[in-house]
Image (cartoon, rainbow, N blue to C red):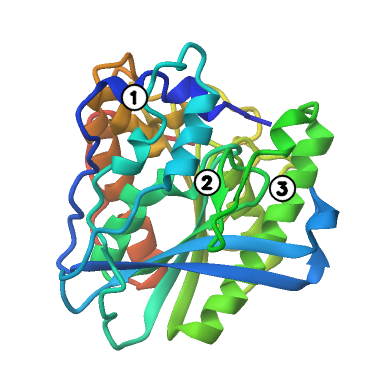
Amino acid sequence: MNILTVGALVAGLVTAPTPALPAPTGPHPVGALSLHLMDKSRSDPWVPASGPRQLMVTVWYPALSSKGKRFRYVTTAESANILARVPGADDIPPGVLATTRTHARSGAPMVRRTLPLVVLSPGFSFPRATLTSLGEDLASRGYLVAAVEHTYESVGTTFPDGHTTTCVVCERQQTKELGAQVSAGRVRDLTFVIDQLKKRFRVGGVAVAGHSMGGNAAVHTLAARPSIRAAVNFDGSLLPDAPPLDRPVLLMGAVRIDATWPPVQAKPKTWLEVTGTDHSSFTDYALLRGQVGLPSQPLDGTRAIEITRAYTAWFLDRHLRGRQTPEPEFPEVRRRA
């Protein structure tokens, strides 16, 4: 299981000016809201004493206006939990990540039509907020987007009553067996969220996407639900191996050999390598690190996010909307067989 701690990825963020995410590129203003969902059919797999599985979900959507307050990136408590895992960060103001500038407007009125749905799953230990720049961009292009926080698998998850959970699973011995357990649990989380969103919104076709363990979960959720049309995996090893799939899968990652990717069978399978990236380059951290002057991936952070957004939108437009738009062309990107 490819488990990188959030702390190692964001060390020293607080020495910089207020972080800011790039503006969405689509024609629509973007709204956002938070959902607190409870799956009463099962106990929490990591902390059974806590009762039914509870999930926080951020929803981005095309809005009718850009009025209102900017949607909060993370809470102060979540920011503090992230920075508490950073070695040598004792003197860092703990709430700095909560100041990150987003573009979605909290509670803005949603457009009134059926929307294609994309459900996002973050990497192991990563908060759902790390996929904000992608979520906002897809919403600006006309998608309903939902990022799922997998409780006790994130360094910090704040619930509406104010309590914040931590990454209980991070403290366990990291084995393939645990990875498979996390993967299976995430499939249940994602399918539950999809069902709940269909009850609340006018949903068309559905795709799943994710980073690292979230990308693994996206592929396995595609396998579990024939009604899901496509999956996107950003730099995530597949544990366990994916079964043969009769629907499209986009694999997008850094330049290295992941032994779990060549065997993937999908119709079609699109495998892209992005030169100059590392494991976190497909999340907001690609940009946040560079903004504060910290060592980062060789590829400029803004460029990394531009590439991730462009190929994701192209793939989803093709397989959720049936739009035969040309594939993006970036010299940093090459196809693998």
Residue 13 placed where, x, y %?
A: 34, 24
Can you see residue 333?
Answer: no
- Report how far apart the C-alphas of labels 1 and 3 lie in the structure: 30 Å
Around disc 3, counting alpha carbons within 10 Å, would you say few (fewer than 14), some (14 to 19), or many (20 or more)? Answer: many
The secondary structure type at the circle numbered 3 is helix
The secondary structure type at the circle numbered 2 is loop
**Where is mark 2, residue-wise?**
122
Q: Is residue 306 above or below residue 208?
A: above
The foreground one among 239 and 106 is 106
Q: Answer with the quarter of the image where residue 130 lies.
A: top left
Around disc 1, counting alpha carbons within 10 Å, would you say few (fewer than 14), some (14 to 19), or many (20 or more)? Answer: many
The foreground one among 186 and 65 is 65
| Marks 2 and 3 in Cβ contact (< 8 Å) | no
Q: Is residue 112 left or right of residue 243?
A: left
- Report how far apart the C-alphas of labels 2 and 1 lie in the structure: 20 Å
Residue 252 placed where, x, y %?
A: 44, 39
| Marks 2 and 1 in Cβ contact (< 8 Å) | no
Q: Is residue 102 left or right of residue 199?
A: left
Kind of residue at disc 1: Leu
Specify which label sits upstream in the sequence, 2 or 1. 1
Around disc 2, counting alpha carbons within 10 Å, would you say few (fewer than 14), some (14 to 19), or many (20 or more)? Answer: many
Q: Residue at x 65, y 43 (%)?
A: 153
Badge count: 3
Q: Answer with the quarter of the image where residue 59 lies.
A: bottom left
The secondary structure type at the circle numbered 1 is helix
Kind of residue at disc 3: Ser
Residue 10 placed where, x, y %?
A: 41, 25
**Where is mark 3, residue-wise?**
183
Kind of residue at disc 2: Pro
